[in-house]
Image: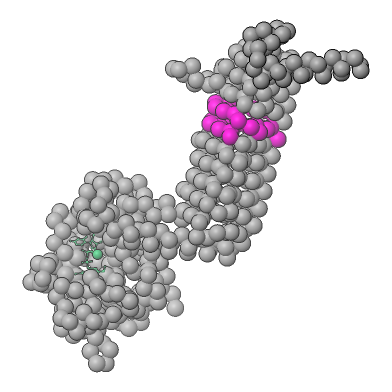
Amino acid sequence: MSVPRPAAVIVLAAGEGTRMKSRTPKILHELCGRALVDHVLVAARGLDPERLIIVIGHERERVQAHLAGTSPDAQAVVQVEQKGTGHAVRTALEAAGVIDGTVLVTYGDTPLLRTETLAALLERHDEDGNAVTVLTAEVPDPYGYGRIVRDASGAVLEIVEEKDADPAQRAIKEMNSGVYAFDGRLLADAVKRVSASNAQGEEYLTDVLSILREDGHRVGAHIAADYVEVEGVNDRVQLAFARKVLNARLLEAHMRAGVTVVDPAGTWVDVDVILEADVVIHPGTQLHGCTTVAMGAEIGPASTLTDTIVGEGALVRNAVCVDAVIGPEALVGPYAYLRPGTVLARKAKAGTYVEMKNAQVGEGAKVPHLSYVGDATIGAGANIGASAIFVNYDGVNKHHTTVGESAFVGCDTMLVAPVTIGDGAYTAAGSVIDTDVPPGAIGVARGRQRNIEGWVARRRAGTRSAEAALRAAEAGKQQGSQT
Ligand code: UD1
Ligand code: MG
């Protein structure tokens, strides 16, 4: 059957999250490239609700600013004082007005909850014609959670909080996930009748169940297939656990779609990463943000790519790449750092100990060893010798260097920008080039070498060098006599 569309999803996210011990509000902590609260909103959006409401309180300016960027479709309702989950829902409904139809309530700190699980809850709620259906789970250790109290026939009677439970109730393993489907009109009425006379002096949303049941309405539960999904993030240990679970889930989907992940435990991907079939990910690799890797490319080992686009068949080894574009069959690393604005065309190379920034490298052009390439355009087929440096910064401003097609920049050349090396031009090794080199010319800018014969024998007499020189001189004589 098709999933009934909820009239509203209300996300409770006003709490402080003290156990994170953080300056960042809990729900804004990052998990696989997305804030905790955004995971929840994405899952909720999958149900296509007519309205998306989020209750915020703690650090509301910061949370509101974040939501304005990621979720302009969500209506933020401020709960000034956090007087309990029942109070939070009451506050939301007072702001939202009458909601006819199904209202789904969930929390901002349960990032593992999938749309499919919420949909299953909605289906059960609809099929059974319930006034409220609570999502529950059987957990090995239910400590701290509200417990689901059922009668002998298995019908749900009430939810009792840990602090209000008697020993028999505490032994119950079925916990309240805090996610519910409600009839909107019945919820609005019942939530006004919730009292705060309990161990914590809070208005418990859980009390709505007993209130509706006592009113003669149908109350039900849906047991989640996987309890891990409903576990919230309250501290950094749980955050790390959630990251592990979500990462494994993402990698499994990639592997099933044809990606080879050599070491899933040592590979980390964000939710928005796109990997095509036959991509190979080697151990110790992290793919962040909107990184996209095309068919057959190999990434890793030990590479971290953020918002980087990798073309078909490229190889990226031991590299850190941020906001870079790596063309098809391009080669990067080992030990390369590609910074924002680096664009490698097809078959271009940024080799060992090479750093690039704001650099366009043409098709088949090579920067194989020990170079810094900043603010540059390198033509197709050009070769940049080992240890060449693009001197882009004069201490105040950055300047551009252009290297022409099939140009050859000698080893250890300093290209002092702004400067242009023409098509097919050369620079001599060790040159400091601060003047344009015309196409086809060679730029030579270095001191002429002079050799001072016998210097070591005179000035370093008795050293190992002097002895070696002496031996060479004798051997040289023989060589000389032979030729
Ligand atoms: C709640 C449930 C408990 C359930 C558990 C699951 C109640 C009374 N208890 O307990 O049965 O097992 O969740 O995790 O509902 N919030 C607000 N405003 C408030 C209070 C809370 O927005 O005034 C938000 C919090 O930010 C959080 C969520 O509601 O996201 C749950 O609040 P929390 O205080 O963690 O409830 P628990 O005591 O864990
Ligand atoms: Mg909690």
In this view, 193 is above or below 284: below
In this view, the residue farthest toward the front is 462
Magenta segment, principal secondary structure? strand
Q: Position of residue 435 (x, y in %)?
A: 62, 11
Magenta segment: does it hold 58?
Answer: no
The picture places residue 234, in percent across and down from the top left corner, at: 28, 60
| Residue 134, visible in the rendered structure | no
Q: Farthest bottom residue?
A: 152
Q: Using the image, determine if residue 24 lies above or below residue 172.
A: above
Residue 463 lies left or right of residue 309; in this view the side is: right
**Over which residues does the magenta segment extend?**
353-380
Q: Residue at x 17, y 67 (%)?
A: 86
Determine the residue positioned at 39% across, 53% down.
34
448 or 180: which is nearer to us? Answer: 448
Q: Position of residue 74 (x, y in %)?
A: 31, 55
Q: Is residue 313 above or below residue 348?
A: below
331 lies left or right of 77: right
Q: Is residue 138 visible?
A: yes
Q: How many marks?
A: 0
- Tell me if residue 393 comes above or below residue 182 in the rendering: above
Q: Is residue 335 left or right of residue 4?
A: right
Give the position of the N terminus as an image quadrant: bottom left
Closest to the observer, 416 or 56: 416
Query: Was residue 369 drawn as part of the magenta stretch in this picture?
Result: yes
Q: Farthest left residue?
A: 197
Pinpoint residue 252: horizontal percent, then vertical percent: 52, 64
- Left or right for 290, reference 171: right
Kindly indicate the quadrant of the structure image that contains residue 191: bottom left
